[in-house]
Amino acid sequence: MRRSFLSLMAIFCALTGWAQSEITLQPMGRTKPFRVIISPSAQPTVLEASTNLVHWVGVATNAANAEPLTVTDPQSTNILRRFYRVQTVGAPLPDLSQLPNGVFMPPDGFNAVQYAPNGKLGFIVWRGKDLVFRERNGTVWREQIIGAFGNTYVAGITEEYRFQPLTALLYDSASRAHILRISGNSVRHHVQQSSGGFAESAAISLSALGSTFALFNAAMGPGDVLHITVVPAQQNAAVSHGSNKTGAWQWSTVTRLTGNPRGFWKQSYAPRWFSLAVDSQNYAHITFCPEFQLPTGPEGYYQPNSELHYASNRGGPWSTQQIAYVSDLSGDAGHGACVAIGRNDQPAIAAWYNERWRTGSSDWCQLHYYTRDASGAWSKMIVAANTDGYLAADGDKGTGFAPYLRFDSRGWPHIAFLDDAAQHFPMQNEYADNLRHAYYNGAQWVTRTVYAQTAALERQIVYPAMAVSDAEMTFIGLDRRTVWQTDRVATSTYYFFSVHLTPP
């Protein structure tokens, strides 16, 4: 029986092109491990095994060999079904975490890392001017440079971590990667080919919407329908949504924002609140902030105020709802949010809530989770309210910044988020770091720290992104290491990082 499964594996390898060497199975009995014989290879190889042809684990990495090589799989004992494949291992890829100020996340970070339906893991970053795609199929990583479309890093400018073009990575139902990037007044669309390379399909015109864009999101719906939302880089801009679900691109106006779509004062953290999700009927769901207000209070201090709003075209025409606001109009309810589709095809939102003093300084903040029932009513849960040791001189100010929400196959929500810290110089600066993960197991929220550090003024995280599969969770982002000359002048060095964890 085991030989028949190996025959199936040989057919699979022939069809997909993954087998780089011939493999022969040597069964050792129901309770003994498999021995796999690999044919001679002029290049190093890795032997991988799977029980379902989706999730692959490495068994052994082998040097180039002139004679057949026998590898024993100790994990195969008492496994009734085991598939094998051999992949050629190329030269080691550069360690992205060792390229300071050389690797940057796509602006806002949403859709920077994804798992494909067949279990592949992919992510995109900007390395220098190059848009780089890395993909792991099983245990082997490969890299593809999509093109030199980016900009050169210049230290010290406003939002220096955000200088690269807006970009997104999606996977379709056939596990092909799609990379979308804003270029002028169009979206350029790169599609992965069977060879592993990319070909550019027809550009998606945005000329009727604007000439440059401040905000961008993309999603892949059922039937591999593309959805895009954009906001032009101008005052009082419109939020526009487009999709090709009718076979041609059609655009509509969701709502119109007031003021600067990027928000008010740029803090030492990187806010993001504009997110997109698509349900099983190819309807779109969006979070946004209609206006970032900065009035002056009675004491003469600025009082930041923002609201969290939600929009959807599920009912036909676009409708919007206010989800959260700060009752005394001094605080942030719309400065950090992410929408995803959860149980019963209903939207859910993870959001940062920051209550402020009348002077504008942060008092406390929390990570909130909103769900909607079939009647359209929203309910709120408090996920986390305290930091995991990420403190500055103002004490524990709370947590929940830059939330990133995704669901696993069980319908459990997972949220990546950052702790918040604050210090007065004499004006208050805020910082975000300590990448944490929260999940709801059906009874309670459980949190753990994924990427820890404690020096709030010297270390911040920018644009953390997360992907979830049944076998693994991956987190990526920028570690911003800062040296302050004054309370407003600093020198920063950016390091890319990635973390891989086993799901709960």
Image (cartoon, rainbow, N blue to C red):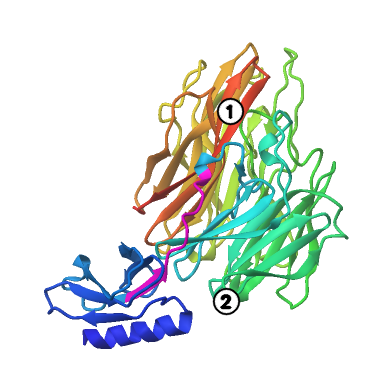
Q: Residue furthest front?
A: 66
The type of residue carrying mark 2 is: Ser
Tell me if 41 is positioned left or right of 355 in this view.
left
Can you identify the residue that label 1 sits on?
355
Name the residue at 54% across, 22% down: 457
Residue 244 shows in the view: yes
Mark carried by residue 120: none
Q: Secondary structure at mark 2?
A: loop
Q: Secondary structure at mark 1?
A: strand
Can you identify the residue that label 2 sits on?
194
* Image coordinates for residue 383, horizontal then vertical, percent: 45, 41
Q: Quadrant of residue 227?
A: bottom right
The nearer-to-camera label among 2 and 1 is: 2
* Image coordinates for residue 433, horizontal then vertical, percent: 51, 33
* Image coordinates for residue 355, horizontal then vertical, percent: 58, 28
Q: CA distance from mark 2 to mark 1?
A: 51 Å
Viewer-nearest residue: 277 or 255: 277
The type of residue carrying mark 1 is: Glu
Q: Is residue 393 magenta?
A: no
Viewer-nearest residue: 387 or 314: 387
The range drawn in magenta is 84-96
Packing grade of label 2 (10 A; few <14, some 14-19, many >=20) is few
Viewer-nearest residue: 308 or 2: 2
